[in-house]
Amino acid sequence: MKQIFRSSALVVAAAILFSGCAAKNGEAPNDAQNTKSGVLIGTLVGAALGAITSKHHKGRNAAIGAAVGAAAGGAIGYSLDKQAQEVADSMQTKVSGDEAGAAKSRDIIVTKHDNYVKITFKSRMMFATDSYVPTAEAKEKIAKLVDVLKNYPDTIVQVVGHTDSRGSYDYNLKLSQKRAFSVANMLKKMGVTNRIYARGCSFNKPLVPNDSPENMAINRRVEIYLYPNEESVIDVCR
């Protein structure tokens, strides 16, 4: 029995570790994909570990490992699904599968990915032109996110600033950094105890081509990523 418990612990650890390798950057899953992906990863890892932990009863151990692994992986996916829905509800919006498309009509876009949740805020509602001081509306929306984050103290938070392509790269880099740091500091001041990182990307990662005023407005944005663990963190500027 002790060996089974030890194997189960390994399964849970491995499921969490390998979940960090499942991200498909830029691809938004449907409503149940996060949970299904987590279950699949957990089942495969659990079955493998269950089979190798003993020379005897490999079939039984594999079945036990698969069951425990599926539960662990499913819990990871479910947590992401749940966070995404709670964030969307708090912002009075919906979870979207098309960030660029949704940005044409919404100021706040919540998207789900395999290993993280992303909240995108259009700059026009967050800051005045060329300013990095959050507006009153920005503070109101961020406060709603804070209420959700208090339920997920282990979630890793990353704040990222983006600009359009007008002006020099260095100017836009500094502006995007200042905006990201400003929002990160606001989260801390509002009582968020999660680990928070901040980064500016200048105009390195446009959502759409910078070929019209409407598209440039879409590219001027602040993103907040919510990660379940360090392994899930992506390079947000590429």
Image (tube, grey):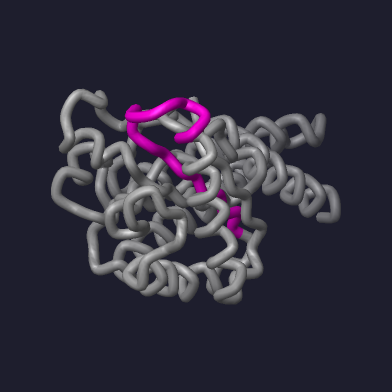
Residue 144 on image: x %, y %: 40, 73
Query: Looking at the image, which residue is at 42% across and 48% down?
Result: 223
- Image point (47%, 75%), residue name: 147
Q: Quadrant of residue 134?
A: bottom left
| Magenta residues, start to end | 155-172
Q: Relative to 69, say whether 235 is above or below.
A: above
Question: Is 71 on the left-hand or right-hand side of 78?
Answer: right
Front residue (pair 159, 20):
159
Q: From this viewpoint, is residue 39 visible? A: no
- The answer to whether one can see residue 143 in this image is yes
Instruction: Please say if 203 is above or below 19.
Output: above
Tell me which residue sits at (81%, 35%) in the image.
Answer: 54
Tell which of 221 and 118 is nearer to you.
Answer: 221
Residue 149, how many percent across, how many down?
A: 52, 68
Q: Residue drawn at (36%, 45%), measured in percent from left and top?
A: 221
Name the foreground residue: 198 vs 34.
198
Q: Is residue 160 magenta?
A: yes
Q: Is residue 54 left or right of residue 118?
A: right
User: Is 167 included in the stretch rendered in magenta?
Assistant: yes
